[in-house]
């Protein structure tokens, strides 16, 4: 085995990627698969699971190493069921990626639709972190598994983005709970970290950043680029390295409670 395989290889590991059919979840699933892990892709709709599986079929060495499941991570009961199904297909998972989340809309605070606010908070915090972390944490503690969780934080975890109230609230809480759960789970050998992507053109933010009629950058898109020292949006493939690094017990075995920005310098921008 090469030095790099020894340090970063995930052979023999099983990962559950919740939200694994999304823009970022797909790349993380592919990265884990390429590094040798078995991967269970969880998503809310069967259609999105099927699409993600089609893409994974093209990844070298993916034969018998990837499955897809329809799991709504907003339901504790369904996450329990998904975990049991994953265990029976692949054995005990070692890695949980909490990749469910996203933003819907943007409004001045006094015009915020409160149903939408609750929906975004639920998607990012309850379904995107709390329920899967609770279910996997309980299972790992009971079965003495030194698991690893990777959450998805955001630039909004550090500084609020304008007009996205529930997203700001959920993502700052995601950073806080990454640290809090890392602290609580450390005595069981369970690591909890996060990746904070800067601005990547995904389904959730594309039309906030690029005008859907003209294809030009919106004012917000221009502001983001002006605030990003690299002067461009990220390419989701640039999240693969941080994923494999944090997932590897050898490479990141003494690292817990951190959030790794992959942001072209957005957080260090100054004037
Ligand atoms: N794209 C970006 O620029 C960016 C930047 C920072 C952080 N993030 C975060 O990364 C994560 C993934 O973002 P993305 O751009 O890949 O979004 P995405 O919308 O492409 O993917 C999210 C996936 O989660 C699924 N999903 C939603 N609710 C679910 C539920 N209850 N149960 C199961 N699946 C559910 C969706 O169907 C979708 O496939 C999110 O937490 C997001 O906030 C994204």
Image (tube, helix red, strand yellow):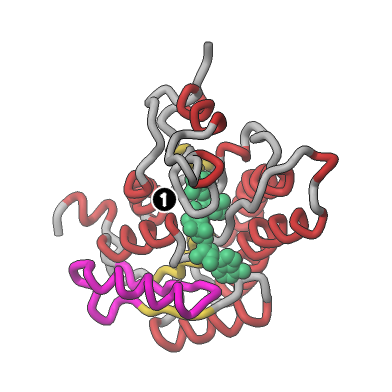
The answer to whether residue 182 is seen in the rendering is yes
Residue at the disc numbered 1: 246
Judge whether 198 appears above or below 249 on screen: above
Residue 46 lies in the magenta-colored region: yes
Name the one closer to the observer, 153 or 237.
237
Judge whether 30 appears above or below 222 on screen: below
SS class, disc 1: helix
**Is 27 positioned to the left or the right of 257 in the image?**
left
Q: Residue 78: x and y, percent?
A: 62, 81
**Is 4 positioned to the left or the right of 53 in the image?**
left
- Picture residue at 64% right of the left edge, 65% below the top: 127
- Picture residue at 28% right of the left edge, 53% below the top: 8
- Which range of residues does the magenta coloring cover? 37-66
* Disc 1 packing (10 Å; few <14; some 14–19; many ≥20): many
Q: Residue 267: x and y, percent?
A: 52, 27
**Is 131 positioned to the left or the right of 42 in the image?**
right
Q: Kindly give the residue lying farthest to the front in the view shown.
A: 213
Q: Kindly give the residue lying farthest to the right in the view shown.
A: 110
- Picture residue at 62% right of the left edge, 60% below the top: 129
- Picture residue at 41% right of the left edge, 36% below the top: 233
Residue 80 lies in the magenta-colored region: no
Q: Residue 169: x and y, percent?
A: 72, 45
Q: Residue 22: x and y, percent?
A: 46, 61
Name the one closer to the observer, 264 or 3.
264
Quarter where residue 176 is shown: top right
């Amino acid at each position: 085995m090469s030095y790099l395989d020894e340090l970063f290889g995930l052979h023999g590991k099983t990962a559950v990627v919740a939200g694994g059919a999304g823009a970022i979840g797909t790349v993380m699933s592919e990265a884990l698969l390429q590094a040798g892990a078995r991967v269970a892709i969880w998503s809310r709709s069967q259609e999105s699971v099927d699409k993600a599986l089609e893409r994974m079929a093209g990844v070298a060495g993916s034969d018998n190493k990837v499955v897809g499941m329809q799991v709504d991570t907003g339901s504790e009961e369904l996450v329990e069921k998904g975990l049991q199904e994953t265990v029976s297909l692949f054995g005990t998972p070692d890695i949980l990626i909490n990749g469910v989340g996203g933003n819907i809309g943007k409004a001045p605070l006094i015009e915020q639709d409160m149903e939408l606010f609750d929906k975004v908070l639920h998607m990012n915090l309850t379904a995107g972190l709390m329920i899967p972390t609770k279910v996997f944490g309980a299972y790992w503690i009971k079965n003495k598994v030194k698991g690893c969780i990777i959450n998805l934080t955001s630039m909004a975890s550090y500084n609020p983005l304008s007009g996205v109230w529930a997203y700001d609230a959920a993502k700052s809480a995601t950073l806080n709970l990454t640290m809090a759960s890392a602290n609580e789970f450390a005595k069981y050998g369970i690591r909890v970290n996060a990746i904070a992507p800067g601005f990547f053109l995904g389904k959730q933010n594309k039309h906030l950043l690029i005008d859907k009629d003209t294809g030009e950058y919106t004012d917000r898109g221009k502001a983001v680029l002006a605030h990003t020292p690299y002067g461009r949006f990220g390419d989701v493939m640039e999240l693969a390295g941080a994923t494999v690094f944090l997932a590897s017990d050898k490479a990141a075995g003494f690292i817990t409670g951190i959030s790794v920005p992959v942001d072209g310098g957005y957080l260090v921008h100054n004037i």
